[in-house]
Amino acid sequence: MRPGTILHLGIKELRGLMRDPALIGFIIYAFTIAVYTEAKAVPETLNNAPIAIVDEDNSPLSRRIGDSFLAPYFKRPVMITAKDMDDRMDAGVDTFALDIPPNFQSDLIAGGAPVIQLNVDATRMTQAFSGSGYVQSIVTAEVSDFARTSTAGDTPDVDLALRSRFNPELNQMWFASVMNVINNVTMLSIILTGTALIREREHGTIEHLLVMPVSPAEIMLAKVWSMGLVVFCATLFSLVIMVQGLLQVPIEGSLVLFMAGAVLHLLATTAMGIALATVAGSMPQFGLLLMLVLLPLQILSGATTPRESMPEVIQTIMFAAPNTHFILMAQGILYRGGGFSVVWPQFLWLGVIAAVFFGFSLGGFRRSLR
Amino acid sequence: MADAAETTHVARLKSLVHSYGKRIALDDVSLDIPEGRMVGLIGPDGVGKSTLLSLVAGARSIQKGEVQVLGGDMRGSGHRSRVCPAIAYMPQGLGRNLYPTLSVFENADFFGSLFGQRSDERQARIRSLLKRTGLAGFEDRPAGKLSGGMKQKLGLCCALLHDPNLLILDEPTTGVDPLSRRQFWNLIDDIRAERPQLSVMVATAYMEEAARFDWLAAMDAGKILATGSPDEILAKTGASTLDDAFIALMPAEKRAAHHAVRLPPPVFDDSDFAIEADGLTMRFGDFTAVDNVSFRIRRGEIFGFLGSNGCGKTTTMKMLTGLLPASGGTARLFGRQVDPRDMDVRRRVGYMSQAFSLYTELTVRQNLDLHARLFRLPPDAIPARIEEMGRRFRLLDVMDWLPDALPLGVRQRLSLAVALVHSPEVLILDEPTSGVDPVARDQLWEMLVELSRKDRVTIFISTHFMNESERCDRISLMHAGRVLVSDTPAAIRDGRRAATLEEAFIGYLEGAIREPAPSPGQQDEPAMPTVPASRRHRRNFDPRRLWSYSRREALELRRDPIRATLALIGSVILMFVVGYGINMDVQNLSFAVLDRDDTVTSRDYVADIAGSRYFIEQPPLRNYDDLDNRMRDGSLKLAIEIPPGFAERVARGSDVEIGAWIDGAMPQRAETIRGYVQGMHAGWIARHAREIYGDAAAGSFSIETRFRYNPGIESLVAMVPAVIPLLLLLIPAMLAALSVVREKELGSIVNFYVTPVTRLEFLLGKQAPYLALGIANAVLLWLFAVFVFQVPFTGSLSAFALAAVLYVAFSTAFGLLVSSFLSSQIAAIFGTTLMTIIPAVQFSGMIDPVSSLQGFGALIGEIYPTTYFNIISRGTFSKGLSLEDLGSAFLPLVAAAPLLIAAAAVFLKKQAG
């Protein structure tokens, strides 16, 4: 193992990258424009949720309920008839349809305990759960308020003061921007190292390397450091200029600590790229394998949906993925402002995973050369 | 031969200028090429011969000047498509335009069908041509497994299938052994005898071949130096051989660098062996590539290795370098057994492989620099060493060029320079001079001689040039894995009583084969089919050509079963993992309470939360610091604070406030928690009120929530219909994108440039097999979803099926569009990933409804077809909808594929730049 060899082989990789303007264009796009648009596109959780109201009561109270759904959480409620409701939900126009029964107000005052029906399109899972809680609390608040003023009843006035820590306004963009950067890190590092290796094989250059005083470990390390460096720089740029600068996302904790974690993560993902390349026989096969690996990594690591809600098995399997730990670490450092004392378990796990992946892919790489 | 005055011209070039970046390949060339002749282009490497030929063939777009071929302007695409059935073009490089995984017959069949020949006609012509080229026994062998000479013969077969009037061959015999070479030219002579109207243009580095041609054009530095018959050129230069004439035609300063090669007598130490092979054997399966080969090469000796293509020379060399472990026998370098892990030995060996294997993404200088550093030359000595190598191999002018922009001969010089950069003691050179012009070849040999005699470098070299093998101290003749004879050149010649080494060589080979190699002239087989190839009138869109591309692509896909299996099985696995894994129903959230009241009422409040399936209670909080720490390290997602006197105030009906802190690090989760807490809070109050006032109290009401379409809120049921569109986008798009870019990267795209195939035929032809694979994928996913994962399918199957077909057409078209403007596979993989995963996962309603998106993302969501297939998939799976219900969602799907294919056709170039 000679540092000079690794250095120069790595420089070769970087020079090769510079020769592919389309690829560089994609990298720049991924870490700038793509991060920006994705962050700007995601709704602020419950945003513009489409709601329709079937007002069969048409009383002051029912109209009051109708007026209580406000932007930006809800779209302006659409008044529809009971007949339209099913069609509209079938077509996916509304996520929520609130059915206020006839004589709701009078029944309420008369103590008839009327029932409001809330229909939720459960295929829209993001809005379905958080939104139905919202709708319930809004309706309850309006009705209770009305009941208090119109009846003599003395219901207790218990308030709930809800505060969100680390992201007081629950700005979805804060989360989405960093998660998109992380997804790009994983995608790019696997693709760059993996394709660099397959390219050498398809162009016959790997054979040339092997008659020189260069060991497989050196070839692999060269690819890891050079492609890792590219992704590292792109990540840093994206976090500082795009996320902190343009998108104005406040970062609580230490960027240095986060980037240190990123290095461990890169070690694991670049090794993964090499491993995939040794398994794949050709570029098209690599492209397919990539999809098979990347999709679960991105969707099941906790960046898209919360880890807690995944089945136990998936959680366990995904515990072996570097993304899972990197995302936990990113949340700990960047949002909660945690220091090393808080995120050390993630560092430890990333280190272990990186070492295992690296060893595994080095073994695979050696075998593939035989 | 006809007089120049009466000849008509098959091609006329006027003031043709062509450059690659700053490098000028053709500098104001005007040339009239006579018809019905065998025309040779000769000249050193990199003087523009290949560029000229590709321009005449119409494979490259004209930059400046005029090219008239077969009576029309090649600038006009109308004329190009009219005449391209009459032109056949074989690009440089062994089998570069062939498809390695397809068999010999399949390759020929593909080319025939591109020219619109009917199946029975094609069959007859292919059989006859294969017979004549001696490939008759090899119909089923994959083209990639043929030897170089056979590849070239197959290439010629493919070129001759459609009876061209103009045959353009770019160095067709470079790297081909003498026997195959002889057969190749005999074949061409025969065909010309039958079809006198056939004009042939050939670029060649073999002067002995050029001597047989009717008319020659000598080129140098992008200009024509001389034209005329070989005799005229000899007369003009006063030289006796074309080799000499060629050298005489060179500009004075290049000529000055040339000396005749003289080999000083060897002085060897007969006990000092650099390379020893003892019973070396290599078996691949049941095929023995190298069979019990032994030789000993003394230090400083030049040892030549001759033999037909595919006889085991390269395999032997690879075993000597340690690239291939031998199946039997031993190989020793410097007395030490070859061990691939021995770095020390590697530094003493220089190896040049047959195929160009340097980095095309590095410049000439960077390649030299990298190798110098890898061989651990002292850093301060490197610039001087690079300069020296550049000077010796005449690379100084191209130091900052990329190898791809250089002609074959110059690239070979670069490979050699690289192999020598660390001054090795042993040089193993696998056909180093293939495609190198005579001047450069002589210079190279001068160097080799100097290395051998002065520096005592041992040189092990394989070659097809007879005059080179004469310069070796000893040569070995190999055939079919065995060494036939091994001696000094003179002894071999004399032993066979032959006049030249070439004759001796062919004699030995024919002796080994026992029967004379099929030489077309001697065959009794009636030559060409009597029926000339049909020439169909030109059609703008010919389903036959489309079909031939489809069939070829499908064959390649079939030869790579891993790809199809991965696509099918992988997508089922992904559907399960992703569908099962994504769950918006947030559960198992950890929460803790700071209960400052600690009464029955407060505990009742907390019990509501703890008892729900959403929350798991953690040990209570002690104080604010505890709350802060546990939230910061992420172990609590929700903290509740109940103020002192809570129960008392509630009982009194006075105002009281409960505090709740939610971990906002993941806003979506926080939002859900907020919804839960608010709902439970409202429920608790309502319940509490009922407990006080009774059920019938005024103001009491309830909200009944119905989760429709998925009452059990099961993840698989909700997600599988959304995951299917995702998978049917990613995988077909990736496959389709790579199928085109791969042809661009590996060179076979030239077939698209020079055959009558239109862009639309090409694109649709490529799309069809992947469309079929995508549809199979859709069927498989549906079956697994319904029968294995038990996702209820409630709507119209025909609506889903129609949408799936339209959608897969879109995703494959999307891949083709991506590939139409990219040229490297790496960029295609990254680009496809970037442009499919993100829009499909984030903007197409899989997780967030499109109606709630904002900004540019909302716009993408509105136009991205995945959005609409999502609506249809969910509608037919969960909502029981029919075709009529979903009518509006179909429109974008119907429009998507044709639009994208049209765009791809616009971007795809029909000629190289």
Image (cartoon, rainbow, N blue to C red):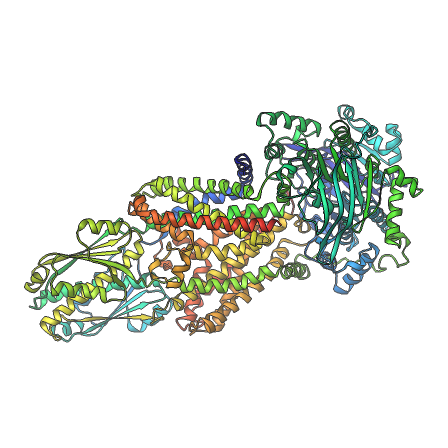
Decide if residue A155 is in sight here.
yes
Horizontal and vertical percent position of residue B418: 66, 34
* Viewer-proximal residue among B315 and A99: B315
Horizontal and vertical percent position of residue A120: 31, 67
Horizontal and vertical percent position of residue B319: 70, 46
With B848 as the anchor, is B173 left or right in this view?
right
Decide if residue B885 is in sight here.
no
Q: Quadrant of residue B234?
A: top right
Image label count: 0
* Viewer-proximal residue among B536 and B191: B191
* Viewer-proximal residue among B198 and B149: B149
With A62 as the anchor, is A330 left or right in this view?
right
Residue A113 higher or lower than B250, as above or below: below
With B72 as the anchor, is A368 left or right in this view?
left
Q: Quadrant of residue A158?
A: bottom left
User: In the rendered view of the protein, which quadrant contains the N terminus of chain A?
Assistant: top right
Residue B121 higher or lower than B150, as above or below: below
With B823 as the anchor, is B863 left or right in this view?
left
* Viewer-proximal residue among B473 and B242: B473
Q: Residue at x 64, y 26 (%)?
A: B387
Horizontal and vertical percent position of residue B733: 53, 56
Q: Quadrant of residue B391?
A: top right
